[in-house]
Image: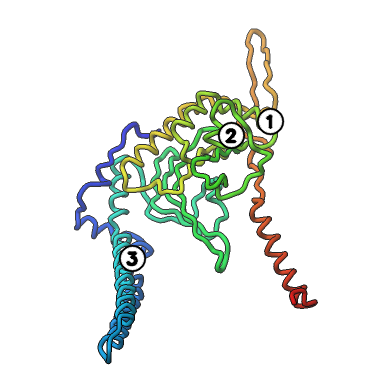
């Protein structure tokens, strides 16, 4: 059961230094240090750059006749060194703040004050959804839970390899629905770039389903083939209005018995407004859970009326989803196919050029 009100004072209250010091000792080494291992190479690089810039300026200005060009070059070298020192100072300050434990201490107190539990860093979470599962280097940060299945946190994972390896970070919030539903995805159009989807996976466009009103301006809905009528049953006009009003900036996934919200910004933060918005959004979106719990997959059986003397019973199919509706079909995005063909063509042309001298 979601809290009707949140006490967010712990997120902004003054830090108790003694309490912070004691709490910091409980944090894993990945968060609390050693700090010097992170910043000393940067400091050495900045100091060496400053020394070399100063030495270079002395060579230009301290010996012989000085020209305007010498002054400009020396000033440029000193400016670059000063810029590098400033960037190093900012990076070191951020590292120190990130490893001070203040963020974790505040979030732990916020969680305790609202009957929640807090985990500063965790490995792979046992959750369904497109940002979970078999992801490389998957780490969850600042995970807040309640006893009813609510989980809010931030997730990082990696894709690619070598020079093409990228780290992705997502904020997420998820809650149990109390029943298993078909796999549905609402791809928010507000966070797409140049009409390209923001989702971490590419879904088969044949699964797109258009709904009435202006819902399609805010979301692209994906439903498994054959489950179009089921999606229309679940997304009645009042449900669509709730999603448009509350979650238009988020990507949404319904999978198994969970509702998941995704954001490219952290959802587990030190900002009270974000927490209040997340809880209010989940409460609004799950207000129709009772209606969703009445849904049954007709593929698992038919609804029958059984008469036993004067007693009439309605036997409905069991809860659950048939295999075709459990997961949407993914596909490789056409952009990657085109790029793959282009690079393959370039490689083939290079081989033919070496063999036959196509380019004079």
- Check disc 2: other Cα within 10 Å, few if <14, some if 14-19, many if 20+: many
Taking the spot 55% from the left edge, 45% from the top edge, the residue there is 128
Q: Which quadrant of the figure contains the C terminus? A: bottom right
Q: Are marks 3 and 2 in contact (CB under 8 Å)?
A: no
Mark 3 Cα within 10 Å, few/some/many (few <14, many 20+)? some
- Whole-angstrom CA distance, mark 3 to mark 1, is 57 Å
**Of the residues tagged 3 and 1, which is closer to the observer?**
3
- Crowding around mark 1 (Cα neighbors within 10 Å: few <14, some 14 to 19, many 20+) is some
Query: Which residue in the structure is indicated by mark 3?
Result: 91
Q: Nearer the viewer, mark 3 or mark 2?
A: 3
Q: In the picture, residue 221 is in which quadrant? A: top right
**Residue at which label 1 appears:** 300
Labels 3 and 2: the sequence-earlier one = 3
Of callouts 3 and 1, the N-terminal one: 3
**What residue occupies the far right of the structure in this picture?**
356
Q: Which residue is the extreme one toward the top?
A: 310
- Which of the 4 image quarters holds residue 91? bottom left
Residue 323 visible in the current orientation: no
């Amino acid at each position: 059961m979601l809290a009707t009100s949140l006490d967010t004072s712990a997120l902004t209250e003054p830090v108790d230094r003694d309490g912070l010091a004691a709490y910091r000792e409980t944090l894993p080494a990945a968060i609390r240090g050693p700090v010097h291992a992170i910043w000393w190479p940067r400091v050495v690089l900045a100091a060496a750059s400053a020394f070399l810039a100063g030495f270079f300026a002395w060579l230009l200005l301290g010996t012989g006749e000085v020209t305007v060009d010498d002054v400009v070059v020396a000033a440029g070298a000193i400016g670059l060194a000063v810029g590098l020192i400033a960037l190093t100072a900012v990076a070191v300050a951020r590292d120190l703040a990130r490893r001070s434990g203040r963020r974790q201490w505040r979030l732990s107190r916020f969680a305790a004050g609202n009957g929640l539990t807090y985990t500063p860093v965790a490995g792979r979470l046992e959750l369904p959804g497109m940002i979970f599962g078999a992801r490389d280097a998957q780490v969850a940060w600042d995970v807040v839970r309640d006893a009813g299945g609510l989980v809010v946190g931030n997730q990082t994972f990696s894709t690619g390899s070598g020079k093409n390896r990228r780290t992705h970070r997502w904020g997420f919030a998820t809650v149990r629905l109390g029943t298993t539903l078909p796999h549905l995805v609402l791809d928010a159009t507000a966070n797409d770039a140049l009409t390209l989807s923001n989702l971490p996976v590419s879904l088969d466009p044949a699964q797109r389903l258009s709904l009435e009103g202006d819902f399609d301006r805010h979301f692209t809905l994906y439903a498994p083939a054959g489950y179009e009528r089921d999606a229309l049953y679940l997304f009645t006009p009042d449900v669509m209005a709730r999603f448009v009003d509350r979650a238009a900036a988020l990507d949404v996934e319904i999978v198994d018995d969970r509702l998941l919200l995704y954001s490219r910004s952290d959802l587990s933060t030190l900002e009270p407004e974000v927490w209040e918005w997340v809880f209010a959004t989940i409460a609004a979106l799950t207000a129709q859970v009772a209606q969703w719990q009445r849904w049954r997959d007709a593929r698992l059986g038919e609804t029958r009326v059984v008469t036993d003397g004067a007693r009439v019973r309605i036997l409905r199919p069991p809860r659950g989803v048939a295999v075709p509706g459990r997961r949407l079909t993914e596909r490789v995005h056409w952009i990657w196919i085109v790029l793959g063909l282009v690079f393959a063509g370039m490689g083939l042309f290079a081989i033919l050029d070496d063999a036959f001298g196509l380019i004079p």
